[in-house]
């Protein structure tokens, strides 16, 4: 899918959390290609430095902002720095996350709290900070990077699933308030499938084997295209990948069947056949990319899809609708001509 050009004449000012790796890093690329001025928000210093180099190589401008999004004061400080450097923030993308692969019965309260503070409250603080600036201007867009797991919980990721569910409910509440106030500030959510990001190599895990995304797997660039699209079109939600649509729609229709299926398959599908390194560092409390740049993609490139037909259909629905109407019109005209 070709990313549409930025509609604005002047470069957009964009804040992206989780910008040092994975989906956040790929999203940085998508905006930098369009000349955006980007606030790079994350904890990992090497990842942020790498992202900044790529922004400049791609034609954008960037500012590095080492930030723990679980601290609202740090998030506010990052936003102030962005606007001091580049001017008013046009788009805020909440993406930063962390997780723990573990049965809930084996998790500690500290672990569950940490995942929730980063993956859920980090979005709350980012949204709060963005709205503080956007509402007085009556302009701006907030993009929440969600997941199929915002609708369908799976085993071994209770804290992450709970956080994504919370983001979904929180975003709906804020959207209703914006509509009530007739605000021109827009908030949207992009629901993601399994993605080939570096997180599976640094996530805290108690699984016997290495963690993996549940197939089918997509490259993070697919996610970035959808995020860029959502930032420039007033869509309530954008679903990426057929697996996301199946999970969300299937859970609405047959939630009990989903419970039974995931109870049977959910453990094996989230692990490879290779034993996990028990000494593998994780990024739950401290970033693992403080001394190493992990980039955008993980270790599942040979199994990851570079495109999503379903995403193309969602982002080009006006073309599809126009085409369908044209065909219907021709059929009607032909029918009248023959009658």
Image: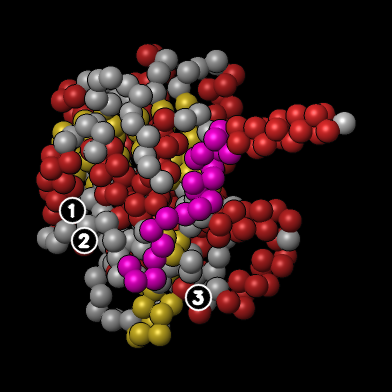
On screen, residue 151 versus residue 228, left or right, reads: right
The foreground one among 3 and 227 is 3
Residue at 55% of width from left, 60% of height from top? 243
Query: Residues at badges 1 and 3 in contact (C-beta under 8 Å)?
Result: no
What is the C-alpha distance between the residues marked 2 and 1? 7 Å
**Does the image show residue 162?**
no
Label 1: which residue? Answer: 47
Q: Position of residue 244 (x, y in %)?
A: 55, 56
Label 2: which residue? Answer: 294
Q: Residues within 10 Å of mark 1 (few under 14, many from 20)?
A: many
Query: Residues at badges 2 and 1 in contact (C-beta under 8 Å)?
Result: yes
Please tell me whether mark 3 sits on a helix, a strand or a loop: helix
Residue at 50% of width from left, 79% of height from top? 268
Residue at 50% of width from left, 40% of height from top? 315
On screen, residue 11 versus residue 143, left or right, reads: left
Does the stretch in magenta take in 58?
no
Q: Earlier in the sequence, mark 2 or mark 1?
A: 1
Does the stretch in magenta take in 309?
yes
Label 3: which residue? Answer: 269
Magenta stretch bounds: 301-321
Q: Position of residue 75 (x, y in %)?
A: 28, 36
């Amino acid at each position: 899918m070709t990313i549409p050009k930025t509609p604005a004449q002047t470069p957009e000012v964009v804040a992206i959390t989780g910008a040092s790796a994975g989906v956040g890093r790929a999203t940085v690329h998508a905006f930098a290609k369009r000349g955006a001025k980007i606030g790079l928000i994350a904890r990992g210093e090497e990842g942020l430095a790498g992202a900044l180099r790529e922004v400049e190589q791609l034609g954008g401008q960037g500012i590095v902002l080492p930030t723990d999004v679980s601290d609202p004061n740090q998030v506010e400080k990052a936003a102030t720095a962005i606007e001091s450097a580049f001017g008013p923030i046009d788009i805020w993308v909440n993406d930063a996350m962390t997780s723990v692969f573990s049965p809930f019965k084996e998790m500690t309260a500290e672990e569950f709290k940490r995942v929730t503070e980063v993956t859920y409250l980090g979005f709350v603080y980012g949204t709060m900070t963005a709205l503080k600036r956007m509402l007085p201007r009556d302009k701006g867009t907030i993009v929440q990077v969600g997941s199929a797991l915002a609708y369908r919980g799976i085993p071994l990721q209770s804290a992450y699933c709970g956080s994504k569910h919370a983001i979904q409910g929180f975003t709906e509440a804020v959207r209703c308030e914006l509509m009530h106030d007739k605000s021109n500030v827009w908030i949207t959510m992009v629901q993601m499938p399994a993605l080939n990001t570096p997180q599976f190599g640094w996530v805290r895990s108690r699984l016997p084997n290495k963690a993996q995304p549940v197939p089918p797997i997509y490259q993070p660039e697919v996610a970035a295209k959808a995020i860029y699209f959502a930032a420039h079109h007033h869509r309530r939600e954008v679903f990426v990948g057929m697996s996301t649509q199946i999970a969300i729609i299937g859970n609405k229709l047959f939630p009990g069947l989903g419970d039974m299926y995931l109870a049977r398959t959910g453990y094996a599908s989230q692990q490879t056949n290779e034993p996990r390194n028990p000494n593998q560092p994780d990024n739950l409390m401290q970033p693992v990319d403080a001394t190493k740049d992990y980039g955008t993609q993980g270790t599942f490139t040979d199994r990851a899809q570079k495109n999503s037909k379903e995403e193309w259909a969602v982002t080009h629905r006006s073309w599809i609708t126009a085409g369908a109407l044209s065909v219907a019109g021709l059929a009607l005209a032909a029918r009248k001509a023959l009658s």
